[in-house]
Image (cartoon, rainbow, N blue to C red):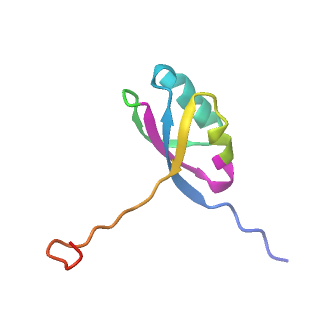
Amino acid sequence: MSEPDAPRTVGVVLAVDPDRFDEVVEALRRAGLRVTAEQPLLGSLSGTLSEDRLPALAAVDGVLAVDRDRTVTLPEPGSPLQ
């Protein structure tokens, strides 16, 4: 019998109420977020968590948006795509 696949870890970027930043970040940590960067003046932060915990982040009071972190690769300078 095989074991079920463990949920994968995903990166997220969140917008939160800047007036309640510390309170909201603490609630996000309790929801499973491992914070990797904070921008309190902008009301944003990034972190990682198990993919199955994404809905828990959106449910935290004070969270305005949750987006998956994405990597964008630009073409080399001088590339025909530029």
- Point out the residue furthest to the right here: 1
Q: For the N terminus, which image quadrant?
A: bottom right
Q: Position of residue 15 (x, y in %)?
A: 48, 37
The image shows residue 73, relative to residue 51, as above or below, that is: below
Which residue is depicted at the point 46% across and 43% down? 46
Q: Position of residue 38 (x, y in %)?
A: 41, 36
Q: Position of residue 62 (x, y in %)?
A: 58, 28
Q: Position of residue 81 (x, y in %)?
A: 24, 76
Horizontally, residue 27 falls left or right of residue 71, namely right
The image shows residue 8, relative to residue 26, as above or below, that is: below
Residue range in magenta is 43-54
10 within the magenta span: no
Figure quadrant of residue 41: top left
- Point out the residue furthest to the bottom here: 80
Which residue is depicted at the point 19% across and 77% down? 79
Which residue is depicted at the point 68% across and 54% down? 52
Residues 51 and 15: in front is 15
47 within the magenta span: yes
